[in-house]
Amino acid sequence: GAFDVGSDFEIATGRPAKTTLQQMEEILQCQ
C-alpha cells in the first residue's frame, strides 16, 4: 500500500516518510 511505498522510499533515500507524503501530494497536485 501507500505506507509500504513510503517506507521503501524512506529506506532507499533516507528521507522521512512525512516528507515523502508531502512530495507525493505536490506531484498529484501538479498532475
Image (cartoon, rainbow, N blue to C red):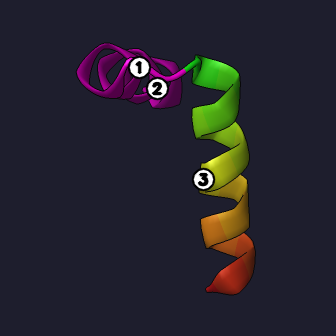
For residue 30, side relative to residue 15 (left or right): right
| Spot occupied by residue 14 in the image (x, y as percentages of width and height) | 39, 17
Q: Earlier in the sequence, mark 1 or mark 3?
A: 1
Name the amino acid, label 2: Gly
The residue that disc 3 covers is 24
* Mark 2 touches mark 1? (CB < 8 Å): yes
* Mark 1 touches mark 3? (CB < 8 Å): no
For residue 9, side relative to residue 2 (left or right): left
Name the amino acid, label 3: Met
Eye-nearest disc, 1 or 3: 1
Image disc number at residue 31: none
Nearest the eye: 31 or 10: 10
| Spot occupied by residue 22 in the image (x, y as percentages of width and height) | 73, 44
Q: Which residues are magenta?
A: 1-15
| Spot occupied by residue 11 in the image (x, y as percentages of width and height) | 31, 13
Nearest the eye: 3 or 22: 22
Classify mark 3: helix, strand or loop: helix
Q: Main secondary structure of the magenta part?
A: helix
The residue that disc 1 covers is 10
Q: Rounded to the nearest whole Å, what is the CA distance between mark 2 and mark 1?
A: 6 Å
Within 10 Å of the Cα at label 2, are there few (<14), some (14-19), or many (20+) other Cα atoms? some
For residue 19, side relative to residue 6 (left or right): right
